Image (spheres, grey):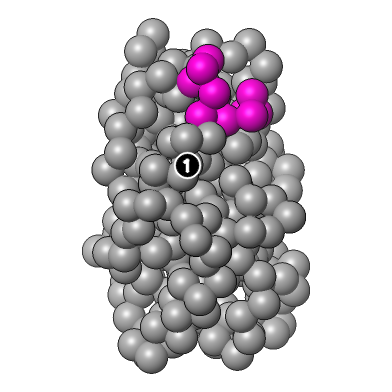
Amino acid sequence: MQQIDLPGLNSKSAIDAGLEYIKNLSPDNVKSVSRIIQALSLGNVDPSLPSAHVSWLIKEKKDDHWETDSVLLDTARAVSALASYGIIFPDVSRWLLKQQLGDGSWNNNLTETAYVLIALGDVKERNTSGCRWLVGNPELTSTGTTALAITALCKHGFNEGDFIDRNVVLLREGQLADCSWKSLAISNMVVQALFAAGEEKAAIRAVPWILSRQREDGSWKNKSDNTALTLITLKMITAWKK
């Protein structure tokens, strides 16, 4: 793993500390475990670690989905996480598709539709109607949902009306003076979206701010899901720099 060339900031050290933090966490919910699995899948770590989290996630599966307080979102997250290790459950893909409404959305909800499309893209299930619903939704105005939409559309190779190009410009224009996009979670989502769209150099400008948010215990915001989400971002960047 190479170090990002940023004065005074050791990305490898930050990643190692973040990995050490999440390695010591016990699996407790589908959202955080799914993100941890994805973070662990992107680097050279103890091979026994991902398998322990993967086994936990598979055991939590109920028939053809994951039964949580956020069934659709967590099922989509679990699908993406397991796909990062080449594990695909066709019954879960079918379940996700059965939840799609006639207008192409999932629950007429931007976030849920984006996450499901990301999951379907990760298991190579193309869904044009869902992508068109996203592109045509006039309520797609917030930075976070726009970033999720870009990531989803890129996974499906969908860019009708130059949606991705136009919104990448808006994301770049929305970057603050400190090179962040307000919160840690949104900044991570934007950087990942920019990477998906091939805008790596624009994404890298946010790295110093992201690294500066790390706590002494190696975490980001002292939370497993924020830490894992940030590690995914940093590992995407270090992989690109190789």
Identify the residue at image location x=38%, y=52%.
91
Q: Amino acid at mark 1?
A: Leu
Identify the residue at image location x=46%, y=31%.
150
Q: Name the residue nearer the viewer: 111 or 92.
A: 92
Q: Quarter of the image holding residue 81?
A: bottom left
Identify the residue at image location x=35%, y=13%.
160
Q: How many marks?
A: 1
Residue 46 picture location, percent across and down: 37, 90
Q: Is residue 140 left or right of residue 103?
A: right
Q: Is residue 92 left or right of residue 34?
A: left
Identify the residue at image location x=60%, y=37%.
112
Residue 116 picture location, percent across and down: 49, 40
Is residue 110 placed above or below 166 in the rendered structure? below
Is residue 20 placed above or below 212 in the rendered structure? below
Residue 21 picture location, percent across and down: 61, 84
The magenta stretch spans residue 109: yes
Residue 220 picture location, percent across and down: 68, 69
Which quarter shows the N terminus? Answer: bottom left
Q: Is residue 179 left or right of residue 89?
A: right
Tell me the element at label 1: helix
Q: From where the camera sits, is residue 229 visible?
A: no
Q: Dot 1, how many residues are within 10 Å of its Cα: few (below 14), some (14-19), or many (20+)?
A: many
Which quarter shows the C terminus? Answer: bottom left
Q: Name the residue nearer the viewer: 162 or 61.
A: 61
Q: Name the residue nearer the viewer: 226 or 183.
A: 226
Q: From where the camera sits, is residue 55 visible?
A: yes
The magenta stretch spans residue 44: no
Q: Name the residue nearer the viewer: 53 or 241.
A: 53
Q: Quarter of the image holding residue 159?
A: top left
Is residue 21 placed above or below 113 in the rendered structure? below
Q: Which residues are magenta?
A: 100-110
Residue pointed to by mark 1: 96
